[in-house]
Image (cartoon, helix red, strand yellow):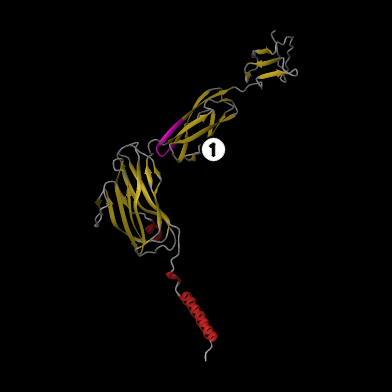
Amino acid sequence: MVQAHETVSASRRLSILLIALSIASLVSISPSIFHSVHAAGLVYVDRPTTAAGSASTAVTVRVQVAGVDPFNGWDIQVESNQSVISPISLSITGNGLEANYSENVLETVSCINGVSYTTSHCDSFDGPGIVHSAAVAHEGNPPTSSVYGLLFTINYTVIRSVSYSPLQILRAVITNDQSPVSLTTRDGTYGIPLGQGFSLTAYPDSPRIAIGSKANVTLDISSYGGYAGTIDLTLGTQLPGLLLSLNATSTPLSSNHPSNVTLTIATDATNEANQYTVMVTATSNGLSHTATVSILTTDKPDFILDALPLILEIHATPQPDFSFLLSGTGRIIQAGESQTFTLTMTSIDYFKGKLYLFASSRFGLEEVFSP
């Protein structure tokens, strides 16, 4: 007779055996059936912002991929405002699958403004302002790792100058043997939206520089309307007697943080005093601003007379008897010249008395007080 505890023991052994067999079967399964998880790649319009041009100007935009899992086909639509910038052609020449992997790429769809330029028909979503490109690759050496580079280029013609249009990716399908590949998209823009831009200010804008010395001018670049982009700076023609330099010729500008660039002005000690006008131009995506810096170079002084602070007080506890004011500071006196300074004394709390004035100089100057 089988005891109850023997039945339970046999059942437990059977359960353990089944679990072991299940684990073994899982180990024996080919790893290829488990799909690896990858970060989504990117399909984007390059550059993010395309500079606006005048009417009838040709503009070229590139549609590219970055970090996309291996693929051999694409189907992408890009839309613009046709009344601002109208597509006229597209080309898959030089695409990354051909250039980097020697693939043969067959263009299956080439649709512009709803008109097909291949044997395939445009679909119902094609129309004015829309570029539709589809292609499939075969043979060659297909990619085995993340793919970067060009898919196709779009050529536009400008209809209205100084205008704005989104360059929006309406559809982006990337496939590998007809299986979709995970991705995200990034649109572009043509021109700058109304109300956005940047300003350029020079400080100081009228520096005085002694011959043989140098000075710095700060160029402040500030955004307004949420504008962000790269600012390129250029100097006007170099002027005899001055050496001009920028510590950066390009600087990023964010919508909430201004950028500063330093203009250094060095004067030639062999040149005479003169007045100069320097132009600094900042450009970004078709926007341009110019700052004017007026420079006055002066003969190198024999000495500089400066008084700080302007108001001197002679104290007699608990309150001062009078205040002493020297009008003007920073006077430059050349050899053989003279300057007059006015000393103003003001009585405090009805003080009365005689004041004795004296001055001294380390340069052998003569000081005369009158009276």
- Up the image or down, 86 lies above or below 144; here it is above
Range of the magenta residues? 283-290
Q: Nearer the viewer, residue 269 or 15?
A: 15
Q: Quadrant of the C terminus?
A: top right
- Up the image or down, 233 lies above or below 270; here it is below
Q: Residues within 10 Å of mark 1 (few under 14, many from 20)?
A: few
- Up the image or down, 289 lies above or below 95; here it is above
Q: Is residue 255 magenta?
A: no
Q: Residue furthest bottom?
A: 1
- Which is the main secondary structure of the residues drawn in magenta? strand
Q: Give SS at disc 1.
A: loop
Snapshot quadrant of residue 308: top right
Q: Residue furthest right?
A: 317
What residue lies at 27% left-to-right and 51% top-to-bottom? Answer: 126
> Is 42 on the left or on the right of 370, as rendered?
left
What residue lies at 52% left-to-right and 90% top-to-bottom? Answer: 2
Q: Nearer the viewer, residue 51 or 81?
A: 81
Q: Amino acid at mark 1?
A: Asn
Residue topped by disc 1: 247
| Residue 215 placement (x, y as % from top left) | 58, 30
> Is 75 on the left or on the right of 217, as rendered?
left
Snapshot quadrant of residue 195: top left
| Residue 119 placement (x, y as % from top left) | 24, 57
- Up the image or down, 53 lies above or below 169; here it is above
| Residue 124 placement (x, y as % from top left) | 25, 53
Q: Is residue 284 magenta?
A: yes
Q: Nearer the viewer, residue 209 or 43?
A: 43
Q: How many marks?
A: 1
